[in-house]
Amino acid sequence: MSAWRAAPFVALMFIVLAPTPALAQARRGGGLLSGPIVLGPRVGRDFGNHAWSLGAQVSVPVGSNLELRPSGDLFFPRDAETGWQANGDAAIRFGQGGGLYAGGGVAFAHPGNGETKTGYNLFFGLGTAAPSERLKPFVEFRWTFVDDTSPFRLALGFNYRP
C-alpha cells in the first residue's frame, strides 16, 4: 500500500486513539485541544457527478478559531458504481459565535470503477446553533479538485458534542 493510500487510515487511527488523553489535558488548561471533540453525520448532493452522498466528520478544535476536520463520504451515482472520498481538512471559524467557517485540505477520491486519486478541497459553511448547544446543524458548500475537475457539493448535517 502506498503512503498516499495509507494516510487516511493513519489519520483515522490517530483520531480514534488520541482524543481521550488530549481532551483530559485540554480540560486542565494545557494540551493541544481548545474544546470538546464533536462528530456527526452528513448527507449531500454532488452536482457535478450527479450523485448523492452519505458521510461523517469529526471536528477537533486546536485553537480558538481553528479546527481539524477529517471526514469521509460514500457516493451513490445514478449510472455508476458506489465510490468514496476521504478528506483531511482544516477549517477557520469567523465571528463571535463562530457560525461562519471556511477551509480546505487534502482529498483522496475513489470513483467506483477507477483508482484512488489525490486532490484538494475548498469549502465554506454555516453552523446554525449557538456554541454552547450539543447538537449543531450545518450547511456546507464544497468543491473537490481532482483530475482538472471541480464538482460542487452541497452538504447538510449536524455535529454532536457528547
Image: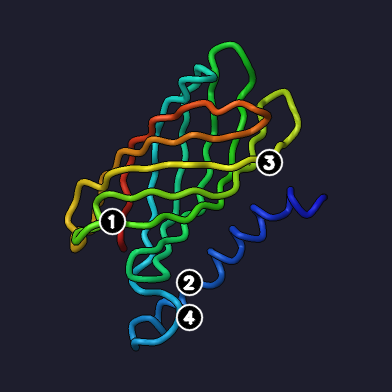
Q: Report x, y in % for residue 91.
A: 42, 55
Image quarter for residue 132?
A: bottom left
> Which secondary structure lies at badge 2?
helix
Q: Residue at x 32, y 57 (%)?
A: 93
Q: Which residue is mark 3?
A: 118
Q: Which residue is mark 2?
A: 19
Alpha carbon separation for disc pair 2 and 3: 27 Å
Badge 2: how crowded within 10 Å, few (<14), some, or many (20+)? some
Q: Report x, y in % for residue 48.
A: 51, 20
Q: Residue at x 60, y 26 (%)?
A: 149
Q: In the rendered structure, find residue 70 and report the number of the disc placed on it.
A: none
Badge 3: how crowded within 10 Å, few (<14), some, or many (20+)? some
Q: Report x, y in % for residue 7.
A: 69, 55
Amino acid type, callout 2? Pro
Q: Residue at x 33, y 36 (%)?
A: 156
Amino acid type, callout 1? Phe
Image quarter for residue 162?
A: bottom left
In this view, the mark in front (3 or 4)? 3
Up the image or down, 85 lies above or below 21; here it is: above
Q: Report x, y in % for residue 104.
A: 49, 48
Q: Residue furthest top?
A: 79
| Contact (Cβ within 8 Å) of mark 4 with mark 2 | yes
Q: Residue at x 33, y 50 (%)?
A: 101
Q: Which residue is mark 4?
A: 21
Q: Residue furthest right?
A: 1
> Which secondary structure lies at badge 1?
strand
Alpha carbon separation for disc pair 4 and 1: 28 Å
Q: In the rendered structure, find residue 94 and report the number of the disc placed on it.
A: 1
Mark 3 or mark 1, which is nearer the start of the sequence?
1
Up the image or down, 125 lies above or below 22; here it is: above
